[in-house]
Image: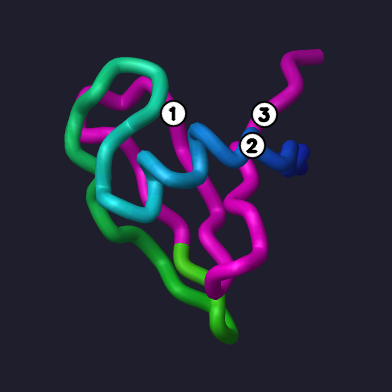
Amino acid sequence: MPDLREVSREDAEKIWTGQCPKCGGRLLAGPRGGVSANVMCENGCQKYNVPPIPALPRRICYERH
């Protein structure tokens, strides 16, 4: 099960403009549920769950067991 970790306000600003805060790549739209959307970097480095503004996006982390 994924762990959702809230990002900083600085990273959120980049995500809201469609830019990956880790590598600068473009964020691609993924599945939606309710009012949130999932996005992932075109380079595959990060995935985010993006609720409506002003709530901060959350990085989707998968724990390895």
Name the image quarter holding residue 1: top right
Which of pointers 1 and 3 indicates the residue nearer the eye?
A: 1
Q: Which mark is residue 7?
A: 2
Q: For the residues marked 3 and 2, what is the alpha-carbon distance in whole angstroms?
A: 15 Å
- Residue 21 vs 18, above or below: the answer is above
Are the residues flagged by discs 1 and 3 in contact, CB closer than 8 Å?
Answer: no
Image side of residue 44 versus residue 5, left or right: left
Q: Which mark is residue 46?
A: 1
Q: Earlier in the sequence, mark 3 or mark 2?
A: 2
Q: Give me the residue at 74% from left, 37% from top.
A: 5
Please say if 14 is above or below 44: below
Q: Amino acid at mark 3?
A: Tyr
In the displayed structure, 14 sits above or below 17; it is above
Residue 51 among those drawn in magenta: yes
Disc nearer the start of the sequence (1/3): 1
Question: In which quadrant of the rendered view does residue 64 lie?
Answer: top right
Q: Secondary structure at mark 2?
A: loop
Tag 3 near tag 2, CB within 8 Å: no
Residue type of the residue flagged with mark 1? Gln
Could you classify mark 2 by the number of other residues whose Cα lies within 10 Å: few (under 14), some (14-19), or many (20 or more)? some
Q: Position of residue 59 (x, y in %)?
A: 60, 38
How many numbered discs? 3
Q: For residue 5, which numbered disc appears in the image?
A: none
In this picture, which residue range is highlighted in magenta?
A: 38-65
Q: Position of residue 2 (x, y in %)?
A: 72, 40
Dot 3 corresponds to which residue? 62
Identify which residue is drawn at 55% across, 54% down: 49
Left or right? Give the position of 12 relative to 45: right
* Residue at 55% across, 83% down: 35
Whole-angstrom CA distance, mark 1 to mark 2, is 12 Å
C-alpha span from label 1 to label 3: 11 Å
